[in-house]
Amino acid sequence: MHTLNLGILAHVDAGKTSLTERLLLEAGAIAHLGSVDRGDTHTDTLALERERGITIQSAVVSFRIPAHGDDDVVVNLIDTPGHPDFIAEVERVLDVLDEVDLVLVMSVFPGFGGQKFMPEVLGKVRALRERGFERHIEMDGGLNAATLPLCAEAGTNVFVAGSAIFGASDLRTTIQGFRASAASARAGARA
């Protein structure tokens, strides 16, 4: 059995809790998809969280992804608040970074392709790297030829760029260009 520790950091209303719910449902850990708007998510348990539709305290959920043989994966996922009023809660989560394998940073509102990149999330990536986090940081949303180098320079090393790639006339050239751009930006950041 393998363990995968994931943390989700993003701006307010990015869909961190909704993504957590979807992962739990797809993994078979829950029978119904909770909704922030309905106040019935599995990770927002405080009455105030359910009333206001926001995450106030971080929550950890664990679930198993079955695989062939003994290769099941246990996923420990940390859902964090996005509202600046609760930054102390996010800081508390950052103290366990040595246990996290990947941090997902959402740079758009999930679920809608082709959105504009939200540059304010780059500070979260820089803060992770400044704290000594050396594992994977994944940036998802709004990535293109202009924003991908900014993410790489900040410290992102895993990129999700759906619209920019699948909207291109030449996928191979676009992907090669993104890889070269990210490598160049990372090299410039180290210099």
Image (cartoon, helix red, strand yellow):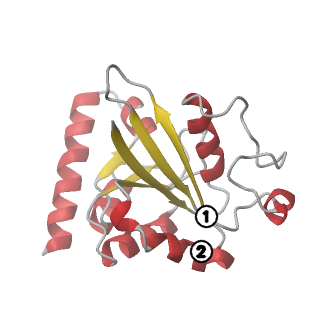
Residue 141 visible to the viewer = no
Q: Secondary structure at mark 1?
A: loop
Question: Relative to the observer, which residue lies in front, 189 or 147?
Answer: 189
Q: Name the image quarter holding the N terminus.
A: top left
How packed is label 2: few (under 14 Cα within 10 Å), some, or many (20 or more)?
some
Please state if 168 lies on the left or on the right of 105 as rendered. Answer: left
Q: Residue at x 20, y 71 (%)?
A: 189
Q: Secondary structure at mark 2?
A: helix
Looking at the image, residue 163 lies above or below residue 78: above
Question: Relative to the observer, which residue lies in front, 36 or 140?
Answer: 36
Contact between marks 1 and 2 (CB within 8 A): the answer is yes
Looking at the image, residue 161 lies above or below residue 183: above
Mark 2 = which residue? 89
Residue 96 in percent (x, y) is at: 42, 69
Question: Relative to the observer, which residue lies in front, 22 or 47?
Answer: 47
Looking at the image, residue 123 lies above or below residue 171: below
Question: Relative to the observer, which residue lies in front, 180 or 78?
Answer: 78
Give the image quarter of residue 45: bottom right
Residue 114 in percent (x, y) is at: 53, 41
User: Disc 1 marks which amino acid?
Assistant: Ser
Q: Name the image quarter holding the C terminus.
A: bottom left
Looking at the image, residue 107 lies above or below residue 25: below
How packed is label 1: few (under 14 Cα within 10 Å), some, or many (20 or more)?
some
Mark 1 = which residue? 58
User: Disc 2 marks which amino acid?
Assistant: Glu
Which mark identifies residue 42?
none
Residue 116 in percent (x, y) is at: 53, 52
Mark 1 to mark 2: distance in Å? 7 Å
Residue 190 in percent (x, y) is at: 16, 72
